[in-house]
Image (cartoon, grey):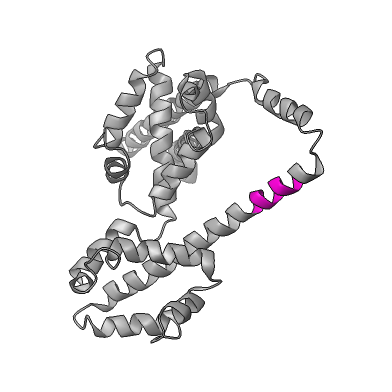
Amino acid sequence: MNMHRMYWLTPVLLALVIVAFSVAALAITEEEAKQVFEKAGCATCHSTPGNDFKSLVDKIRSWASKYASLDEAVANEYKQAQTYDQLMQQMKQYTPSISDEDYQLLYQFFKQVFEEAKGGAGVTESEAKQVFEKAGCATCHNAPGNNFDSIVEKIRSWAEKYGSLDEAVASEYPQAKSYDELMQQMKQYTPGISDKDYQLLYQFFKQVFEEAKGGQAAAATPTTTTAQVSEATTTTTTTPKENITTLPSVPTPNPSEEARSRISTGLVVGVAILVVAVVLFVVFRLKK
């Protein structure tokens, strides 16, 4: 009986292993996407700092903390498009020679970047704003400089001036000594707010400060380094710059198409083995 089970159980396990590895390998790496991005000619326009491949990836990741979906992000960030698909179709027009395979790879990669970032993101800005309005906070906080958007920008600006959110609140709001105390006071003005909505806003404003604080710390390091380099190598800056700029021009192999083809083949083979295993199982059951 155990031997009979092995006839169909072995191919089932083999098929599941092949399918699992094939699906996992289909995730597009950043290096693969960058190579296709450059090969397709996207870097012709997207080449300057703030608009190059790395900057686009970082920008899409940042959208995950502000927007609930990629379509919502595009509609707010790019006025000429209302959806992600529409934006990508427009970008495709600037690279008419791009193959369908390369276009689909970039399409899926940027979408993947947002979804992965979204999986690790906290409360989005649009979600918090909806709760802010639903809870009645906008009854008092509705004027320019005091509305939701202004409060968010104010909290972000605190990251440049204060070491912690409690320190910021104690300095900016004399009636409260800590962030928790201030939020408790705000809660008294909206007695109908649910605990869930209160916690969401509490976490969101805290998240805004912490994210801005992290960005300030990251931005501080390269500034100091640049100043030190310019002082120490005033007369020898030309040669290092030439060496640095020539490094990216070194050709690198692009095995992504061959690898992806093999992965797809492995996926098909795995599914085929799984089908055979099911057939063997059915035949075995009928013989009984």
Q: Main secondary structure of the magenta part?
A: helix
Q: Nearer the viewer, residue 160 or 102?
A: 160
> Is 222 in the magenta?
yes
Query: Considering the image in quadrants, where does the C terminus appear?
Result: top left
Query: Considering the image in quadrants, where does the N terminus appear?
Result: top left
**Residue 116: % across, % down:** 43, 47
Residue pictured at 59% horizontal, 54% vertical: 218
Q: Is residue 191 in view?
A: yes
Residue pictured at 48% horizontal, 46% vertical: 2
**Residue 56: % across, % down:** 46, 37
Please, which residue is most extreme toward the top here?
97
Q: Is residue 100 above or below residue 143?
A: above
Q: How many marks?
A: 0
In the figure, residue 202 lies in which quadrant?
bottom left
In the figure, residue 286 lies in which quadrant?
top left
Residue pictured at 53% horizontal, 29% vertical: 34
Q: Is residue 13 in view?
A: no
> Is 218 in the magenta?
no
**Residue 60: % across, % down:** 42, 43
**Residue 196: % across, % down:** 28, 74
Part of the protein shown in magenta: 221-229
Residue pictured at 39% horizontal, 23% vertical: 103
Residue 254 is left or right of residue 86, and the answer is right
Q: Is residue 229 above or below residue 155?
A: above
Residue 86 is left or right of residue 19, and the answer is left
Residue 175 is left or right of residue 220, and the answer is left
